[in-house]
Image (cartoon, rainbow, N blue to C red):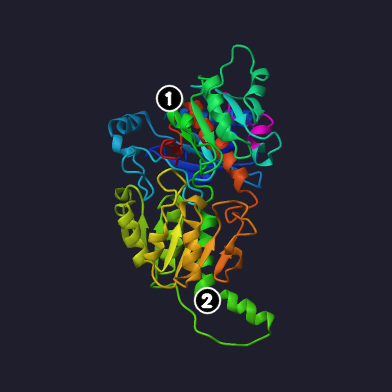
Amino acid sequence: IYNSLYNFSTENYSLASRFGSPVREGRIHYWTYTNMTRMAFVSALSLLSRNGGKTLSSSRTRFTKVRQTPRITAISSFSSSSDNNDNNNNKTSSVISSLRADPEMIRYKYWNREESESRQHLCVTKVNHEAHILSLSALDDPPNDALHKHNGTLPMGATLLGISPTVEEFADMIPEGIQPNVLFVSPSCPNASLELPKLLERYPSLEWVHFRSAGIDFVVSPELSANQSVKIFSNAKGQFSSTLAEYTMMACSYFAKNLPRLIKQKSQKHWGKYNVDELRGKTMGIVGYGDIGRACAKLAHVYGMRIVALRRNPDLCNNDPLCDVVLGADKESLHTLCRESDYIVCSAPSTVETRGMVSAEAFENMKENAVFINLGRGPVVDEEALIEALRSGKLGGAALDVFMEEPLPQSSALWDLDNVLISPHNMDQTATFMHEATEFFVNENLPRFICGQDLLNPVDTTKGY
């Protein structure tokens, strides 16, 4: 490995031959991925640094498993001792320059499928904090295979103690003297909102709870909000945004180009021309400008659309080039967004504060022939008021991926409305999306926990997101 590294570094990446001016980052590809190989790689880096006369920081070595190919990308960031001292004295160097960074945080805290470095995590060379994991999940849940059937590939210092959908079954799985400190919660667990508080009470040693989904409404309860023992909750935010953004633009085009008419004309073998709308120059209002909302804005911006965003803390959008207007989350701001928007995208989470926020009054403030798109959560919208706005012709149409009750009952009037596009809450359901959510836990946040690093995607259970 050392010889290979040396040859790569001198011929391709200059990792060793240019130590005169410290290199910050180099990339090397190799074809095996085991704990033994990772340790050998780190040892080879150390040897390479000694021969080069500088000190490599092996604790900052990162590894990435590339999906569906055996190739591994290893990224080693290193500098001389003097450089490390300089960095310690200059705290601003840790601020990540990203439009998605929270200005209130020194470090970038959210992961995103499009913008974050894919599957890169700290190589665990020193265990600062062992992870004893419980999985509150159905036993037969294939998306959890990266954790449940890891075959020894969990990071060093991590142990899966047991898998169960109920609290009682964990008692026989935990070895004597071991205290579980990490809990993985899957949406496949029935009655998760009832089991989770009992689990937290039974095992006060739990420090970190991770949810495999982006939304946590399936576990929210007064007991969870009142919990004080768990240090941090996290979720799979950032895994589902890109495909939902694609759905949003498809829904906009569905109505702008009148796809129902095209489908009908084809079935009738009728050649009939008609005028279509263009999305360029139209306004998209986004209710809930989080990761999904911003992914929608990113694509809409490319289409030439104007973006009006609504979020709890508008200051987080300062200098965001995608937004033309950013409003607060009060009722009047929502009505302002409705009056200005041709397409209203609802991507808000379901919380106590957001339930029913898109009310009859909000629909009354929408433009004539506006299109409403809901891809967040069904309870955020007054469904009866939506149906009335569609029936009356106030709205030009609606594209709905989420509903108050799921599956949508056959008795719902939405099925009979020609100006409604219905999908069965599957517009984020790619073949790998849930597998990737588990891999994010295993490959990114779990090594961070073991190494004592900040975890990504923190969740405030009192707010519900």
Q: Main secondary structure of the magenta part?
A: loop
Q: CA distance from mark 2 to mark 1?
A: 52 Å
Q: Which residues are magenta?
A: 146-157
Residue 11 rendering spot, x and y as whole percentages: 52, 45
- In the image, what residue occupies the spot 53% across and 61% down? 246
Does residue 147 show up magenta in the picture? yes
Q: Secondary structure at mark 1?
A: loop
Mark 1 nearby-residue class (10 Å; few <14, some 14–19, many ≥20): few
Q: Secondary structure at mark 2?
A: loop
Residue 84 rendering spot, x and y as whole percentages: 35, 31
- 337 is higher (above) or lower (below) than 292: below
Write down the residue under mark 1: 228
Of residues 465 and 404, the one drawn nearer to the viewer in this rendering: 404
Q: Residue furthest right?
A: 140
Q: Marks 1 and 2: in contact by CB < 8 Å?
A: no
Name the image quarter holding residue 147: top right
What amino acid does circle 1 point to? Gln
Quadrant showing the C terminus: top left
Mark 2 nearby-residue class (10 Å; few <14, some 14–19, many ≥20): some
- 109 is higher (above) or lower (below) than 58: below
What amino acid does circle 2 point to? Lys
